[in-house]
Image (spheres, rainbow, N blue to C red):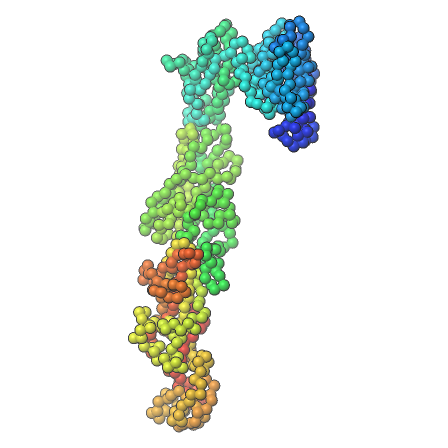
Amino acid sequence: MLTTLADHAALATARGLHPGHPRATTIREALGQRDPLLASHIAPSTVWASTAFRAVEPSSLSTASRSLDPAALAGIFDVALHQLARDLSAQAGYSPGAPGQTAGSLLKLFGADLDADAILDGRGAGGVQLIVEGAQPVPLDAQSLRLPLAKALDTWIRGSRNLSGITETDLLAAKVYASMVQDASDLFAEPPSGDLSSVVDHTPPLVAWVTLPPEAVAHSSVHLVVAATDGQSGVGRVLATVGSGLPVQASQQVDGTWSLDLPLAPGPNVITAWSEDQTRAVPNSGRYVGAPYELTAVVISDVVGPAIGYAADGSGYWDERGMTLAADPSGLAVTPARYRLAGTGPIRIPAAGGAVYKTPARLGWTAPPTQAELEDLGGGNVGNIPVLQFWNAYVEGVDAPIAQATYSIAFDCPTCSGAPASGALWASPRIDPGRQYWDLPLSAALVPGLAALAGPAKVSVTVTISDVAGNSTSAVLVSFDFHLIGDPVAAVEDGSYQFKNDPKSTYPYTIASGLYASLFNVNLVSFLPEERVRLVRFLVSNPAPVPVALTLPTVPDGWTARESWVGTSGASLGTRSYTPSRTVCTSAPTCGGATPVLFLGGSAGAGCGTSPPHAQTPVTDVPIVGQGGLTSFAYNQAQGWDSSPAQQVGPTQVVVPPAAAGAPGLVAIYFGRPASMPARTYLLPWNGSSFEYLVEDAWTKTSEGASI
């Protein structure tokens, strides 16, 4: 009969009729789903295999003495269904001797119930209510094969037809009644509503923990407090045992509770507590009945603190030295900043002797990363937050679970102003047999002192891991040097600077304009307050939301510039010529007492004399080697042009402002020579025997000499 019912359940499930399993499957797969449920409805899987009822012929429990084996368990369903048919016949109005419902007719009703939707809910095809016919029809429902079946079985097992030797106590110990009454599988449309105590005429006392047993203790015993109640016959005693050990009797306290101390072995201990009533010489015992007549708990005895360590293979970041920025076609940094990390991959941070280099703009986060992002140093950790990883030894079910894992960070440096930081470590998703892992993101959001560093600092991390038993282990597991370095900025030379006619620059002051002499006038207002003549201009852009202190570059002695004569500078003298009285000299530096002058006309000749104007190929670039004095200075930028001197934070540092309104902060860096430098004159050979006296016209930069 049990296999017949299982067939109906499996076939309906295979057709996809079960609301919880709407996909049609093979019959083999459906049998694999339903058979274990039908088997466990009779007894737990620990008592018989899920397919045992298909492998044996149900035994006749009314003809031979036998043990509670699979054949007997299969027969139990048959006798229970026969007795249930008699009970329902009586409820439907049949007299005891009259023919009524049989196990076979009931089996058809329950089969029709399962055929409709693969669940027992008392309704057949089209939702029609299934009933046991009679003078007083009895409707079937989701409970019909639970509590009523268990009661029917108990009636039969205690009756005269039971010649098997199997008793009510045996069925209680095997949890047969509990399996039927408390079956919460999806064979049924509703949760179980029956109480196991109503199956038999006498029930053991109800028991409950007054205080839940701890998950773990740091000693070799545990104190238990149990409440036991029995409204009919009273509580006789309360007992508890560890594993299969001998029971220990509890002592009743003045408040009516029962308490005892149980010895524990190292590791996990399965504790069972139950009560007995006072009804008869063989009292009703909750042992093997299950909740709420029997309590179970697992308590771990763990007297050793967790073993902890540093996981260097899970700790790392990308070194931010050499980090660059993405720039737009004009050379200004893109906003928001797009960083390009240098190097070939993440650097592992060792337990000692390591170093971390981070920039302030990338020291924190707007929103915390997920654990997966944090540990993905290949690209998922977009903020490049350094991660330190720690571990503790742990075997689930053997060691006491971890209650908390914390860190404490200390700084050691002459200028450290950041207070020590502490907090909870982040549980890592990393899986490793025998270990749990924890992460510490080195972010200013968790460790504000990092952002307050004014120089390199020695950072040490103390980790403390405690378990629920009260054991705790603490140790300094990693120390390293932390360097807070400047955020990168983008620098690009202003290639059009010579065409902007900046009055503070060298470019407007040419011979052609008649302003050349002003280049060497230290009192010229245009060159104040720096008293410098600007030669080169760079734009420095900062895309970060924080200001950056920029050390102004210095230029060593030996810098090189060139002065160009107007003949090739783009500003021509046109047809301008000089009178024949101008002198061509055949010797230098003087010519018979005459002062050499710029010669733009005349022909080659010997000795001193005058010559008519003539066309001569001009000398274009005259090298000038500086011997110091070339300096740099910075100005703020407002709408693309200088507004005011940049803010200084020291004798040699200026502030590049942060990005704002979607644009990077800007400063202009100028390289300028002293305005007090004297004008240069040169005597150059011409045609091998004569000399010309040239006056410089304009400055142009060059790559020769020391680089800037």
Give 255 or 312, whichever is nearer the viewer: 255
The total number of labels drawn is 0
Residue 675 seen anywhere in this rendered image of the structure: yes
Vertical order, 14 against 351 (above or below): above
Residue 47 at what x, y percent from top left?
A: 60, 19
Residue in view at x 43 percent, y 32 percent: 403
The residue under the point 69% across, 30% down is 26
Compared across the picture, whether 64 is left or right of 570 comes to right
Q: Quadrant of residue 582?
A: bottom left
Asked if residue 241 can be seen in this view, the reply is no
Name the one closer to the observer, 259 or 534. Answer: 534
Left or right of 292 in this view: 407: left
Residue at 67% in and 31% down: 24
Residue 188 placed where, x, y %? Answer: 60, 23
The x, y position of residue 104, in whole percent, is 69, 14
Residue 9 in the image: x percent, y percent? Answer: 66, 24
Give the quarter of the figure containing the C terminus: bottom left
Q: Which residue is the extreme one toward the front?
A: 135
The N terminus sits in image quarter = top right
- Would you place residue 578 above or below residue 266 in this image? below
Camera-side residue: 557 or 253? 253
Residue at coordinates 33% horizontally, 61% vertically from top-left? 648
